[in-house]
């Protein structure tokens, strides 16, 4: 059988629900290389991220963790930071939570972060990232940063407003995260 160079597949791909699957219980999730989320009753799969996305996520995380060292009332999560909000399980490339609202229990976080960050990957479509930003806001996240490595810009999404920022621009901080205002280029510093 001949497989074309570009498969006609759009990510995320919906997986069949494994027997005994319970979204709240991570031990029931399938073991796969890549990322999964449970949204609107569907188990969705995305392949592992490519180099450009990985480099930008690490730049984002560096900025968030550097800021958090002087703000001990907050904690940063990354690596598809899992959260159970409503009936869905989503993972953020990076997020910032109030420390007093999160108690480490070795499971999914049950409170929304103040800030969620998504970095566009090779297969991500702009509209799907915007839809995820709307999902975050609907579930109590104050602000979402959508980082686009290819175009070197960041969309900041709050309530009904989306603003775009470019290289030298400083990003606005959510009200609770005073001083967290990196420049777009600081998030993208590893890209050439």
Image (cartoon, grey):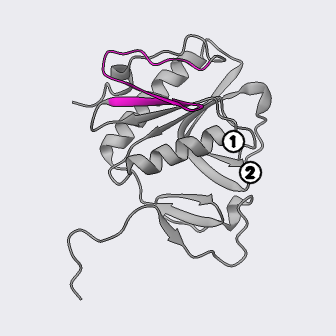
Q: Quadrant of the C terminus?
A: top left
Give how far across and how far down residue 14 sits, in percent.
52, 69
Image point (46%, 58%), residue name: 34
Image point (73%, 46%), residue name: 106
Q: In the current view of this chain or complex, which residue is farthest to the front?
A: 160
Crowding at dot 2, Cα within 10 Å, few <14 / some 14-19 / many 20+, comes out as few
Q: Are marks 2 and 1 in contact (CB under 8 Å)?
A: yes
Q: Is residue 192 above or below residue 107?
A: above
Q: Residue 86 got which mark?
A: 2
Question: What's the CA distance linking mark 2 and mark 1?
Answer: 7 Å
Crowding at dot 1, Cα within 10 Å, few <14 / some 14-19 / many 20+, comes out as some
Question: What secondary structure is marked by label 1?
Answer: loop
Q: Nearer the viewer, residue 19 or 135?
A: 135
- The reply, left or right, for residue 42 in relation to residue 35 is right
- The reply, left or right, for residue 192 in relation to residue 178 is left
Whether residue 88 is visible to the viewer of this picture, yes or no, is yes
Magenta-drawn stretch contains 113: no
Q: Nearer the viewer, residue 38 or 72?
A: 38
- The reply, left or right, for residue 90 in relation to residue 45 is right
Q: Nearer the viewer, residue 158 or 33?
A: 158
Magenta-drawn stretch contains 172: yes
Residue 171 found in image quarter: top left
Q: Which residue is mark 1?
A: 139
């Amino acid at each position: 059988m001949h497989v074309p160079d570009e498969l006609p597949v759009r990510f995320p791909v919906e997986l069949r629900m494994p027997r005994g699957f319970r979204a709240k219980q991570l031990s029931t999730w399938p073991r796969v290389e890549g990322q999964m989320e449970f949204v609107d009753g569907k188990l969705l799969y995305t392949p592992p991220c490519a180099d450009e996305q990985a480099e930008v996520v690490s730049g984002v995380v560096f900025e968030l963790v550097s800021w958090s060292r002087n703000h001990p009332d907050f904690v940063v999560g990354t690596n598809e930071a899992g959260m159970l909000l409503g009936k869905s399980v989503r993972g953020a490339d990076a997020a910032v939570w109030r420390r007093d609202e999160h108690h480490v229990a070795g499971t999914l976080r049950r409170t929304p972060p103040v800030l969620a960050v998504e970095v566009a990957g090779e297969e991500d479509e702009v509209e799907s990232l915007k839809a995820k930003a709307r999902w975050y806001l609907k579930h109590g996240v104050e602000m979402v940063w959508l980082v686009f490595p290819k175009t070197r810009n960041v969309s900041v999404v709050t309530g009904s407003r989306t603003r775009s920022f470019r290289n030298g621009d400083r990003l606005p901080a959510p009200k609770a995260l005073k001083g967290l205002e990196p420049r777009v280029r600081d998030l993208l510093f590893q890209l050439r």
